[in-house]
């Protein structure tokens, strides 16, 4: 008998979960393999541009980059719903442009939906996509692709006007048919109020524990970077120091010619020393 195929979550089935949605970013097959048993949702975020390619922002990320990483994450995962970010410039022009890019990303990777940044101005596009079979996560609050018009990676919703705008964005995105609304870097009370108002789940990053789920950039929560992580990132591990320790131990062993050892070589006498 062949192995039973694991059933993958869809964006719609995530909404029915009775526990908060556990989400992380993933860009590669080996990382997806490690995250998949514990996560409901893996986001192939356009943060790949900054995390993997060392870019200053996400603006230069292309659909081709997203596609390659989405394919890798799909190969490495079995049960998590995989959602791909639509990168900057690939969907803002028209609903038709958004559909072409989303359809290609989904068809060529097998991912279960797309995420796009924007509120009321993207409602028509979200409706167009959903009507044509593309499940969507809407991303409101801090929108990294708008970093230049927004004035940096700052928290959103500090005054009544801004708070009202974020609320209206979230409502418009949900109304347009988004399966989930991701809220980034807003005040706890605002994220909580939005979550209570919406009929679809919210996922927070720097938002509220009352959101329907949480997401973090995996490399941030693993402590793979230096000191420049936002205050909402909790470091669940300190992998950077583990890597530094491993690499410095390796360098010492290579320089001392204690690596490779006899056991790690073919045909080297056991007790031979250099
Ligand atoms: O690209 C990304 O990683 C994101 C985060 C909000 C998770 O959109």
Image (cartoon, rainbow, N blue to C red):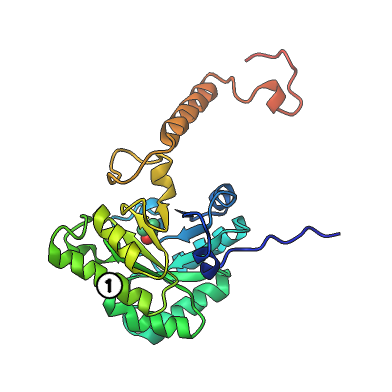
Is residue 25 shown to the viewer in this render?
no
Residue placed at 32% from the left, 78% from the top? Answer: 122
| Image coords of residue 177 (percent x, y) | 41, 78
| Residue 112 lies in quadrant | bottom right
| Frontmost residue, 17 versus 215 | 17
Is residue 179 shown to the viewer in this render?
yes
The vertical placement of 268 against 149, above or below, is: above
20 relative position to 235: left or right = right
132 relative position to 193: left or right = right
The quadrant in which the N terminus is found is bottom right
| Image coords of residue 228 (percent x, y) | 28, 43
How many marks overall?
Answer: 1
Question: Taking the image as four quarters, which one is ligand 1 found in?
Answer: bottom left
**Residue to which mark 1 is pinned:** 169
Q: Secondary structure at mark 1?
A: helix
| Image coords of residue 94 (percent x, y) | 34, 85
Q: Callout 1: 10 Å neighbours few (<14), some, many (20+)?
A: many
29 relative position to 212: left or right = right
The vertical placement of 239 against 245, above or below, is: below
The quadrant in which the C terminus is found is top right
Residue placed at 50% from the left, 67% from the top? Answer: 67
Residue placed at 31% from the left, 52% from the top? Answer: 206
């Amino acid at each position: 008998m062949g192995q039973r195929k694991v059933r993958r979550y869809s964006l719609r089935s995530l909404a029915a979960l009775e526990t908060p949605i556990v989400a992380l970013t993933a860009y590669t097959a080996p990382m997806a393999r490690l995250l998949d048993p514990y996560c409901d949702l893996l986001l192939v975020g356009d943060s790949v541009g900054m995390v993997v390619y060392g870019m200053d922002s996400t603006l230069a990320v292309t659909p081709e980059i997203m596609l390659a990483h989405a394919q890798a994450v799909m190969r490495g995962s079995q049960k998590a719903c995989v959602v791909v970010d639509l990168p900057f410039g690939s969907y803002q022009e028209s609903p038709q442009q958004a559909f072409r890019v989303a359809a290609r990303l989904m068809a060529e990777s097998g991912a279960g939906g797309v995420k796009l940044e924007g509120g009321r101005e993207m409602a028509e596009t979200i409706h167009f996509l959903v009507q044509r079979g593309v499940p969507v996560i809407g991303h409101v609050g801090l929108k990294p692709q708008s970093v230049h018009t927004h004035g940096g990676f700052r928290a959103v919703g500090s005054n009544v006007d801004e708070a009202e705008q974020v609320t209206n964005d979230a409502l418009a995105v949900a109304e347009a048919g988004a399966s989930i609304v991701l809220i980034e870097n807003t005040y706890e009370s605002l994220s909580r109020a939005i979550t209570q108002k919406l009929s679809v789940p919210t996922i927070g990053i720097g938002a509220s524990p009352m959101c329907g789920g949480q997401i973090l950039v995996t490399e941030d929560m693993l402590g793979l970077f230096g000191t420049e992580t936002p205050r909402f990132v909790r470091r669940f591990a300190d992998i950077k120091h583990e890597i530094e320790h491993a690499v410095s131990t390796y360098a010492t062993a290579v320089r001392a010619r204690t690596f490779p050892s006899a056991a790690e070589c073919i045909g080297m006498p056991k007790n031979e020393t250099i």
